Amino acid sequence: MSAKKRIGILTSGGDCAGLNAVISAVVEAASKRGWEVLGIHKGTDGITETPHSYEVLTVHNFSDSPWPRLSGSYLGSLNKGVKMESLEEMSRRFAIGVKELGLDAVIVVGGDGSMNIVSNYCKGSTVQFIGIPKTIDNDTPITEFSVGFQSAVQVCTTAIDSLELTARSHNRALIVEVMGRDAGHLAMHSAVAGQADVCLVPEIPYTIDGVINKLKEIKASGRDHAVIVVSEGIKTEDGSHLSNKKNLVGEAVYGGIGQYLCTEISNRYKEFQIRTTTLGHIQRSGVPVAFDRLLGGLYGAKAVELLADGEDNKMVAWIDGHVTAVPLSEVVKAGTTLLNPQSDVVMAARELNIYVGEIEK
Ligand code: F6P
């Protein structure tokens, strides 16, 4: 058995379904080795703020509770909307917190941004660091899947199914705006799964006329309803983002493109009544689907194994059906993974007659 360790686990950034399954897996695998797990509250705040905020997690009080089956984060998460001190000051506080809590290692369940930030904090201390990718946007580089993505796809697909039924009753074309920031993975996967008619994503240019032509084609085929999926990050037809709003760390805040499309299409084409639904944060809090809980188990177990092997500054990743570990520096260097317009899912969407924008042949 490896030397006894005290490890901290925290969740950082926007929550998603499956986080508690990850925490549970870490608790199980660490307990098996006789290690102690501190669940850190509210992201890194639980370490950098005083008094530190945490609790001891055990198989008995956490893994055997209903929490691993639920969405949300039992530990709470740090929201990017909070203004932070300088990196130097945060690293100093982090190093003090880690020492006072007696941590040998920290596991961060977060997006690439959170992992990058915390790995920088860790540079000033001897604590081992392992990241576990999570995001409904599925844009964390290198790994094919981040925890939370499949559950969000399920929420969006269920919404498309529901909208299709009311669209059918009222002979309407219904637009659904989904999250994903600048990546169209969530929109495209749910549009294919839900058999939508149109799917607009930030990576592929589109025209309003292209959407209208698709609606005309549907009408001509004798069908009187349609469902249109739009990713929140798409631009207006003239190539601008609707809002210039930024959060406190300078990232664009999206929302409203569905309503813009509704107005534009309605002004130019009157054969369908058009309405918009914005799904919003329910995409982050659906029931964790089996695949996200499975990822939670695999990633949590792998993270603990990596710590036992003395690994540091790595992110666990799913690559070609295997769970492996990649250096965090490579993840940071790779940047965000956007939807590839030539990917299988986009190709399938086109084969299935979904209008996905203007892709060159
Ligand atoms: O990154 C996850 C995500 O849900 C994005 O899809 C979305 O744009 C953003 O977070 C919303 O952030 P907030 O919770 O700050 O509104």
Image (cartoon, rainbow, N blue to C red):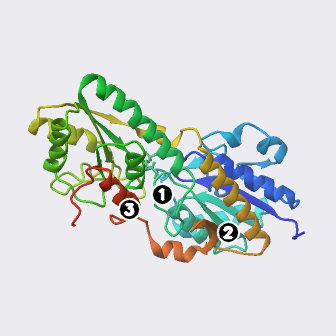
**Residue drawn where x is 70% and y is 43% of the image:** 68
Name the residue beneath numbered marker 1.
138
| 65 over 94 or under it: above or below | above
Q: Is residue 330 visible?
A: yes
Q: Is mark 2 within 8 Å of ligand 1?
A: no
Name the residue beneath numbered marker 2.
129
Depth check: 289 or 279 in front? 289
Depth check: 200 or 139 in front? 200
Q: What crowding class fits label 1: few (fewer than 14 Cα within 10 Å), some (14-19), or many (20 or more)?
A: many
Q: Are marks 3 and 2 in contact (CB under 8 Å)?
A: no
State the image coordinates of residue 149 (x, y, percent, origin top left).
51, 51
**Residue drawn where x is 44% and y is 40% of the image:** 157
Q: Which mark is residue 115?
A: none
State the image coordinates of residue 94 (x, y, percent, origin top left).
65, 64
Judge depth for marks 3 and 2 and give the one in front.
Answer: 3
Find numbered disc 3 in the image and state the secondary structure of the residue it sits on: loop
**Residue drawn where x is 79% and y is 70% of the image:** 308
Q: Residue furthest front?
A: 221
Q: Earlier in the sequence, mark 3 or mark 2?
A: 2
- In 3D space, how far apart are the residues under numbered discs 2 and 1 (Cα atoms)? 22 Å
Q: Residue furthest top?
A: 169
| 341 over 292 or under it: above or below | below
- In 3D space, how far apart are the residues under numbered discs 1 and 3 (Cα atoms)? 9 Å
Residue 194 position by quadrant: top left
Total marks shown come to 3
Q: Is residue 49 visible?
A: no
Left or right: 277 as drawn, with respect to 221: right
Left or right: 55 as drawn, with respect to 227: right
State the image coordinates of residue 303 (x, y, percent, origin top left).
70, 64
Q: Which mark is residue 339?
A: 3
